[in-house]
Image: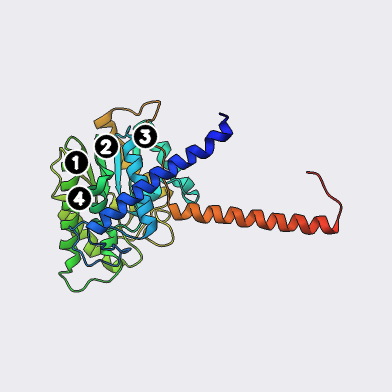
Amino acid sequence: MTNQSKLPIQWLAAAGVLVLSLHSVTQAIRAAGGRVGQRGEGTSAAADQPTPRNDSNSQIAHAQLLEKARKGGIDIYFEGDSITRRWGASDDQYKAFLANWRQNFFGWNAADFGWGGDTTQNILWRLKNGELDNVNPKIIVLMAGTNNVGKLSPQGSDDPRVAEVTRGIKAILDVCQQKAPNATIVLMGVTPRNDNLAVMPIINQINDNIARFANGKKIKYLNINDRLADKDGKLFEGMANRDGLHLDVKGYQVWANALKPIFADLLGPPAKEDHAPPPTGDPSARKISASSRQSEVRRQSLRASTANASSPAVMF
């Protein structure tokens, strides 16, 4: 059998794995009641209650992350929302971030399991539904909570988001320790939001609370906010993109500079080879990219046919 005849069978086999994974995801979501986690606008579920994202794009992404987890070879496991996801993603628009990721972490077998828009309850659901099963990383880097905070101004001096997010992050820590008992967890402080500086007191209170979860051994707390922003939480020039929330390359480098001494202390220097699975990306971005390529092919064909009708053929 030729390679050409084998290729469609390989495609079908890969598609079959994805279909089975998606079926498992759908069944798990139905078993959880089909609750939906929204992007930073809060959900009906408490922050410490596992809640699935049942949009199809998130289901596909979850299936891909399950497959990544099964591949193994992961010593450092990054978990979080879009701030984490974009750093180690394969999406074309984040090429510079992935280059920075590789420049800093190659040889330490680091893998990114962040997913955009996730609240603490969404991260909890993913962890409880296979994404950390049998991975056995040596280090887990966790940053969560900004989508629970959102950009709504504080509702009085005792905003309920402080206690909610604190409980949500504690629940994530508990699951991580249950599923990866030998891992050292690096718990990151919630980074500044400049889409509404009024929420900075909420973020600061959350960070004060979660810092107490660190024991200096199996849970280490790391807050880089004083390197990203001034004392009022206003991000320094170049640290974030125009939305005032997501980090840019300069901000990611600040994060990397804070992590690398911890990694070196726990794992030693990076090796010359890396065994982590390849990065994953946003499934919808690939669909858009494929659609754009098809549209461009059609446009080129139309231009070619128009040119052929009006002028002699030209060889390139």
Q: Secondary structure at mark 4?
A: helix
Closer to the chain start, of discs 4 and 1, is: 4
The residue sitting at the top extreme is 272
Give the camera-side residue of 34 and 68. 34
Residue at image position (27%, 71%) is 153
- The residue identified by callout 1 is 179
- Of the two numbered discs 4 and 1 in the rendering, the one whose residue sits closer to the viewer: 1
Q: CA distance from mark 2 to mark 1?
A: 9 Å
Residue 190 in view, yes or no: no
Residue 201: x and y in percent read 22, 64
Residue 172: mark in rendering? 4
The amino acid at mark 3 is Ala
Q: Amino acid at mark 4?
A: Ile
Q: Position of residue 102 (x, y in %)?
A: 42, 38
Q: CA distance from mark 4 to mark 2?
A: 16 Å
Disc 3: which residue: 276
* Dot placed on the residue nearer the N-terminal end, 3 or 2: 2
Q: The residue under label 2 is which amino acid type?
A: Val
